[in-house]
Image: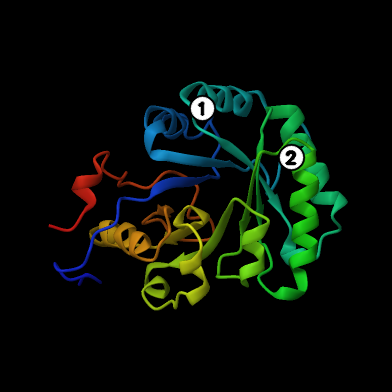
């Protein structure tokens, strides 16, 4: 089964935004691969302990430096609990990523999606930028209301299984915004459908994506078995 016919127009292969939720001491080869394939990677999300942890860790300092040298941007993971955390708490974590790892990008995860929380995230993004964050991402995991797009550089608008990804509806407002604004994460993908998942992300105007066959409570505990082909042409329909 494939979601496309041969007559469909084929968008370019999305660039990767990688939730790197694995330790360099456990998966050193995965971190090395991220640096080696820098041209394919738009952003790596650094997550030590659902945040920056209590102190800097030298192995993470070293891999961040390696990625930076390769030209890969790195964002610190910050949980917002759907707007329920007092803003000083996530901003404190932003400061730790900046000071400990010299990061200039942040991923605010578990971001709310309703209109009622827009002002919270607008203020959070504005304050993070004044702290030196040049790139702000909201990971909603679903399509939020349009207003969030005014306050972030990247919106995570899907996170879930391959089965659920086949059935999602794309809001019309997304067509009025650059596809560079959208990011989809698809896990539990049968290996024979990895290519289909990337193609579907492109057709749904997500210029960034991450697809993995891995499942469970943390499908991001290592890189996927099938890394995307480097040549975009090999990821287009025949």
Residue 169's place in the image compared with 43, above or below, is below
For label 2, the residue is: 53
One can see residue 56 in this view: no
The image quadrant of residue 85 is: bottom right
**Secondary structure under badge 1?**
helix
Q: Is residue 117 left or right of residue 59?
A: right
One can see residue 208 in this view: yes
Residue, x 70% and y 45% (percent of image)? Answer: 51
Q: Nearer the viewer, mark 1 or mark 2?
A: 1
Q: Are marks 1 and 2 in contact (CB under 8 Å)?
A: no
Residue, x 79% and y 64% (percent of image)? Answer: 119
| Picture disc at residue 188 | none
For label 1, the residue is: 67
Foreground pick, 205 / 229: 205
Residue 195's place in the image compared with 133, above or below, is below
Residue 13: percent from left, percent from top: 31, 50
Residue 221: percent from left, percent from top: 50, 47
């Amino acid at each position: 089964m494939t979601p496309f016919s041969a007559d469909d127009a084929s968008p370019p292969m999305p660039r990767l935004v990688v939730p790197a939720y694995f330790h360099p001491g456990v998966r050193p080869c995965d971190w090395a691969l991220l640096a080696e394939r820098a041209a394919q990677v738009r952003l790596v999300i650094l997550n030590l302990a659902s945040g920056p942890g209590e102190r800097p860790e030298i192995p993470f300092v070293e891999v961040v430096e390696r990625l930076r040298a390769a030209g890969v941007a790195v964002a610190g993971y910050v949980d917002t609990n759907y707007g329920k955390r007092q803003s000083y708490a996530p901003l404190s974590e932003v400061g730790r990523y900046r000071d400990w790892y010299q990061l200039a990008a942040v991923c605010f995860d578990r971001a709310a999606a309703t209109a009622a929380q827009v002002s919270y995230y607008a203020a959070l993004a504005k304050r993070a930028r004044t702290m030196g964050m040049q790139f702000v991402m909201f990971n909603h995991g679903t399509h939020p209301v349009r207003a969030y797009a005014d306050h972030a550089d990247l919106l995570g608008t899907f996170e879930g299984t391959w089965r659920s990804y086949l059935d999602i509806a794309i809001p019309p407002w997304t067509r009025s915004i650059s596809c560079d604004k959208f990011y989809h994460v698809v896990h539990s993908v049968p290996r024979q459908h990895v290519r289909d998942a990337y193609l579907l992300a492109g057709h749904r105007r997500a210029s960034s994506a991450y697809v993995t066959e891995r499942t469970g409570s943390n499908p991001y505990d290592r890189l996927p078995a099938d890394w995307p082909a480097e040549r975009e042409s090999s990821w287009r329909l025949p």
